[in-house]
Image (cartoon, rainbow, N blue to C red):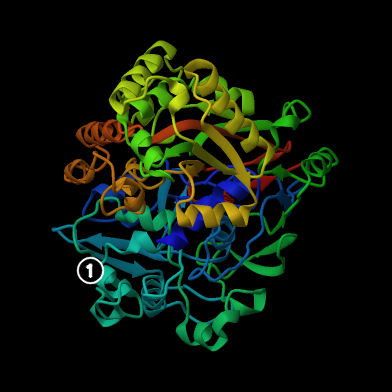
Amino acid sequence: MKKKIAVLFLTFILAVSMLGGCGTYSTNSSNDSTNNTSADDSQNSNTSSGDTQTDNSTGDADTTSSMDTINVSAGTALTLNQFVSQASNDYDALYLLMSSLVRYYDGTIENDAAKSYDISEDGLTYTFHLQDNLLYSDGTSVTAEDFRYAILKTIAPDSGASSLSYYLGIKGATAYNSAEGTKEEVAVTAVDEKTLEITLEKENKAFIKAISIYPVFPVREEFAESLGEEYGTSPETILCSGPYTLTEWTIDTSMTFEKNDSWWNAANEFPIKTVNILDIDSANTEVSMFENGELDIAASVDTNYLATLDGFIKSYEGSTEMFLWIKETGTSDEATAVLSNLNFRMALTYALDRSAISGAVSKGFIGTNRAVSANYPTATGKYVEQYTVDTAPVSGNIELAQQYLAAALSELGYSDVSELPAMTYMSFERDDMKLLGETITDIWKQSLGITSIQFVQYPIGTAIQNFYTGNYDMFMISLGCSVSADDIIKSFTSTGDYSFFSADWSTDITDMIADANNEEYDSDVYYQKIAAAEEALLNEYSFVPLYNQTFYYAIAEGVEGYVEPGAAFQFQFNHLTFTK
């Protein structure tokens, strides 16, 4: 549990946003992509879309002006070992280097290593039929056993894989991961070299979507085990099975990918021959290189340079959100009594004009009062627009906040707000977090007269230590939703990733989410029930949404087919072309 939480905290530290999905971080300044867009209809049927596979042809380009190389400013991988990776930058690279059973692209699920798959009538067993010509970069065949090995290693008791939670629904997986069962009891079977069978504990209609966004990539056991901890640390210590091979890699500096003509669908996808990823620390340098033609795509543009690159900028809102967490068990008995009082937490929340606060910190921040990212789609629109909740408004309400505070003081036996105990609002040392924290505490001081909440900042290591030891009363962290609309809220159930945080809450939405998941996935009834659970969580007023982040990127003239997914992997160059 602590390991995952540290990752989430680091996501906010290193990326302004948290995967996130959840549980990964990005070293590139604002492109941690952890939310999801709509999937194809295959996830709602008993047979895969493989029998009617989408035509991935890109058509003929003008070869006289086509560019074979493209330069992109983005984060480089820290490791290419999927079994220990916790960074979204790693999975961005793995998307180009590896085949997965199914591949997520621009809101759809496409066949990749699996040319088709079948789902049993009870919805529990998935049978994947692999492509006939799957090869590693050394010319050897990719087999079903390679996927089986990778899945079992992902869910092993000592797993550090960020995708772990998405595979624990496999029959026997949770028991194996908790060392209460064996890997032989995990229902993943290589029926033959080209057939993989996976059986779930219970039906999960989002399973295909989950393994497309958080895939396990095939690994030959003998190769990986012979390398031990060196596996995935250099181009020589991985076997590529995807659209590209890795020819050069300097951590925190650059990566070079060369088109893999042996990939099974090389003739139809990923037309760019060479992709250079450049990790550029300076926003000014990045903009200068883009203006000089040294960069063709700037995957994340600092908001201070939007006017400079006007005409090349594109954007999207959402995928990650910033939250204020109010810990109901405080750092002292007196603080606990205050923070566990619902009226007091409502007073703090209703006092906040989240649009004004976020706008004051950055033009890229958009105030929100929802626990689902703004760009999470349904089949017909955006979830947050179609399914409303009754909770504190984004603009706040000072008059109601003052009424809630008066009620809290009366219930707590205080005659005046000056009698409130000292409480700590913790963040880490960064300028924008300083502005955000000081703005919020100043609002509480000016509108409610509360002066006992002290905003403190610590170096990263100290902040994480305080987080682990519970030495805070409030803190900020960002989360993202990806596979389903309940990704964030289910983390705060009695069995969720943050059950420790919500253990003292009066609200438990476990049964509400379970009831929603009994409905047809992505149906209107499903979303109505998710919205009811979201509303119940928000009205605990210990988990307070602050803002969604708007992500800005720049595209050079002549670049076509670039996808900034806001979900899954940043390097979705499946149909990218560049002409001059």
Residue pictured at 30% horizontal, 25% vertical? 389
Determine which quarter of the picture holds residue 441.
top right
Q: Position of residue 38 (x, y in %)?
A: 38, 40
Is residue 322 positioned above or below 226 on the image? above
Q: Position of residue 407 (x, y in %)?
A: 31, 19
Is residue 390 positioned above or below 485 on the image? above
Residue pictured at 45% horizontal, 66% vertical? 161
Q: Position of residue 253 (x, y in %)?
A: 75, 60
Viewer-proximal residue among 126 and 372: 372
Left or right of residue 179, residue 300 in this image:
right
Left or right of residue 567, residue 155 in this image:
left
Rate crowding at label 1 as few (under 14), some (14 to 19) or many (20 or more) other CA atoms within 10 Å.
Answer: many
**Where, quadrant-wise, is the C terminus in this rendering?**
top right
Left or right of residue 351, residue 208 in this image:
left
Kind of residue at disc 1: Lys
Is residue 116 positioned above or below 188 on the image? above
**Disc 1, SS:** loop
**Disc 1 marks which residue?**
171
Viewer-proximal residue among 425 and 488: 425
Residue pictured at 73% horizontal, 54% vertical? 279
Residue most extreme to the left: 122
Residue pictured at 82% horizontal, 47% vertical? 294
Q: Position of residue 120 (x, y in %)?
A: 18, 61
**Where, quadrant-wise, is the N terminus in this rendering?**
bottom left
Viewer-proximal residue among 287 and 291: 287
